[in-house]
Image: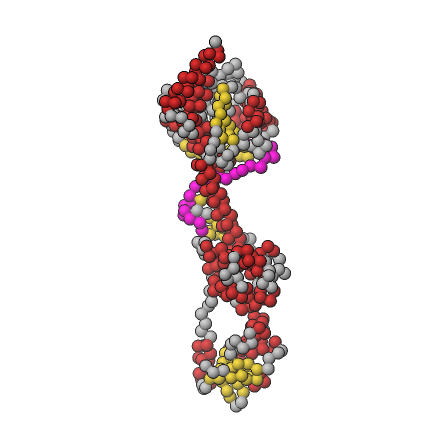
């Protein structure tokens, strides 16, 4: 339609419009009028030399408020008064502009389109995200224009957060944050926090995937020592990052070749704890300063409940380590044990400790959530009644409760069907803790390595493995097992090596 330039002094608001519309100062339109004065015309009818506005009253008042306008562009309609309100309704039928379109317009105004991430950050001033007086290299004028033309009444800080969310959703819009801001579900600040939480979860997932990939390709070594773990001073140079072991339980088993101490056969619990402390202190002496110690231990019901685990915990604290937490290990198919006046026990305890003041590496084992995908979920409402939200990743941290069967003998007998061991722990129990507390290339130690369950788990997670056991039969088996695990020798080569090692021991003894 043709526009006519009309002096402000000749323009009024039509009386029919004033009956239904109360005009208030609108800073957005005033700002727009100052910067883009000729972009949008007002709709008027001509009556007795006066141009009466039927649509565009805000622009009229903003022009007066701006103080530097003498005239406005007008579209003059030739309609009777009876059609004025219906015509006004027609002109006010506007489609709501989605926030994503507004963000695209902001990109254009700030000169972000076609720039790399570094340039975008400079233009937006992302290095000073929370500074309300920071306008980046785009400058304050462009920021104000971007906000006003988009109809967004907020600070430069909030604009930066909005554009961060908008940029993030270009590659991952699974959370629907821009849609959520647009429909009023989230405020911009809340959406920004959800985005940051999502990024953090994405980073952790990538870290886990990288660790798994490195574990597969990592060259590792192992060493097995035939000695008592009461003195580990010869292993100090290795400085293990992780120790995981299952000490001999009190009065439950009689193990072969246990030397003079006969650990586990002590007459009293006090003696058992005193001997346990000797092993722990020897281990602490060789551990890395940020080391983690994981202990699988069972309660003893011989002669009644003796609080063995509780006393073992107190001994650990007295020895100077810090207990991070403990996990119940529930054995789903344990051998029935009948106790007087009590239920059948099927549990053991796994204690997780760290060296005093240690900075622990913790990348916890994860499991799939029920939904199996990343999504925003409602949390508890805030004190003021407003909704709160959080990002749930497709995976969540496993609980501290471990439920497995007792060990399947095939886990170790596949390396030698003739080897026997009274009570090795399943590899699954080792796996949860080794996976969560190690990085490929770390060194791990099992000071009661027995059947080598822990040693194999260490190696399969890309860690170097050290085993210690006083029983020479177990040491011989662990060497054989680890050579086969690492694929260094064939079965026939192993047999030949074992014969040579046996002959060497006999020669040395002679």
How many marks on residues? 0
- Asked which colour scheme the image uses, the reply is secondary structure
Position of 72 compared to 506: left or right? Answer: right
Q: Quadrant of residue 127?
A: bottom right
Front one among 444 and 98: 444
Q: Which residues are magenta?
A: 350-375
User: Majority secondary structure of the magenta segment?
Assistant: loop
Residue sitting at 47 percent across and 18 percent down?
A: 471
The answer to whether any part of residue 206 appears in the image is yes
Is residue 81 rendered magenta in the image? Answer: no
Residue sitting at 51 percent across and 24 percent down?
A: 447
Residue 109, position as x, y percentages in the image: 53, 66
- From what the image shows, is residue 365 above or below residue 390? above
Front one among 146 and 181: 146
Residue sitting at 42 percent across and 48 percent down?
A: 373
Position of 497 compared to 143: left or right? Answer: left
Q: Residue furthest top?
A: 510
Quarter of the picture holding the N terminus: bottom left
Is residue 369 rendered magenta in the image? Answer: yes
Residue sitting at 51 percent across and 82 percent down?
A: 74
Q: Residue furthest bottom?
A: 48
The answer to whether any part of residue 398 appears in the image is no
Residue 29, position as x, y percentages in the image: 56, 72
Residue 105, position as x, y percentages in the image: 50, 66
Residue 376, position as x, y percentages in the image: 46, 52
Position of 176 compared to 67: left or right? Answer: left
């Amino acid at each position: 339609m043709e526009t006519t330039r009309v002096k402000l002094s000749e323009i009024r608001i039509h009386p029919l419009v004033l009956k239904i519309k109360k005009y208030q100062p609108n800073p957005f339109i005033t700002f727009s009028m100052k910067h883009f004065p000729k972009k949008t015309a007002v709709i008027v009818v001509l009556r007795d030399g006066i141009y009466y506005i039927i649509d565009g009253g805000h622009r009229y008042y903003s022009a007066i408020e701006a103080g530097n306008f003498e005239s406005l562009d007008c579209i003059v309609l030739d309609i009777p008064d009876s059609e004025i309100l219906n015509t006004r309704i027609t002109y006010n039928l506007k489609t709501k502009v989605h926030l994503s379109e507004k963000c695209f317009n902001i990109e254009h105004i700030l000169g972000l389109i076609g720039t790399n991430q570094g340039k975008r950050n400079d233009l937006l001033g992302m290095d000073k995200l929370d500074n309300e007086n920071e306008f980046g290299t785009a400058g304050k004028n462009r920021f104000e224009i971007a906000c006003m033309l988009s109809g967004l009444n907020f600070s430069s800080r909030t604009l930066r957060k909005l554009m961060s969310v908008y940029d993030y959703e270009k590659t991952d819009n699974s959370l629907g944050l821009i849609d959520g801001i647009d429909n009023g579900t989230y405020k911009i600040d809340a959406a920004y926090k959800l985005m940051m939480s999502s990024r953090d979860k994405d980073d952790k997932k990538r870290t886990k995937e990288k660790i798994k990939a490195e574990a597969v390709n990592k060259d590792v070594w192992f060493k097995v020592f035939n000695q008592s773990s009461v003195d580990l001073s010869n292993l100090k140079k290795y400085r293990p990052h992780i120790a995981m072991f299952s000490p001999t339980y009190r009065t439950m088993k009689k193990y072969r070749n246990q030397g003079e101490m006969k650990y586990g056969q002590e007459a009293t619990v006090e003696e058992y704890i005193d001997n346990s402390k000797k092993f722990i202190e020897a281990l602490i002496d060789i551990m890395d300063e940020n080391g983690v110690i994981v202990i699988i231990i069972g309660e003893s019901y011989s002669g009644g409940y003796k609080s063995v685990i509780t006393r073992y915990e107190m001994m650990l604290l007295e020895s100077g380590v810090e207990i991070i937490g403990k996990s119940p290990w529930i054995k789903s198919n344990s051998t029935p044990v009948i106790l007087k006046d009590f239920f059948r026990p099927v549990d053991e305890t796994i204690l997780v400790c760290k060296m005093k003041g240690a900075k622990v590496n913790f990348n916890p084992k994860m499991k799939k959530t029920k939904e199996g995908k990343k999504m925003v979920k409602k949390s508890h409402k805030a004190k003021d009644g407003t909704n709160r939200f959080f990002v749930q990743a497709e995976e969540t941290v496993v609980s501290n409760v471990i439920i497995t069967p007792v060990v399947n003998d095939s886990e170790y007998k596949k390396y030698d069907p003739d080897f026997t061991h009274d009570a090795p722990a399943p590899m699954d129990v080792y796996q949860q803790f080794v996976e969560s507390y190690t990085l490929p290339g770390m060194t791990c130690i099992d000071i009661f390595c027995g059947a080598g369950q822990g040693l194999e788990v260490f190696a399969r997670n890309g860690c170097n493995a050290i085993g210690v056991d006083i029983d020479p039969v177990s040491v011989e088996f662990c060497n054989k097992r680890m050579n086969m695990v690492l694929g260094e020798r064939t079965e026939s080569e192993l047999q030949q090596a074992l014969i040579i090692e046996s002959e060497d021991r006999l020669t040395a003894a002679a």
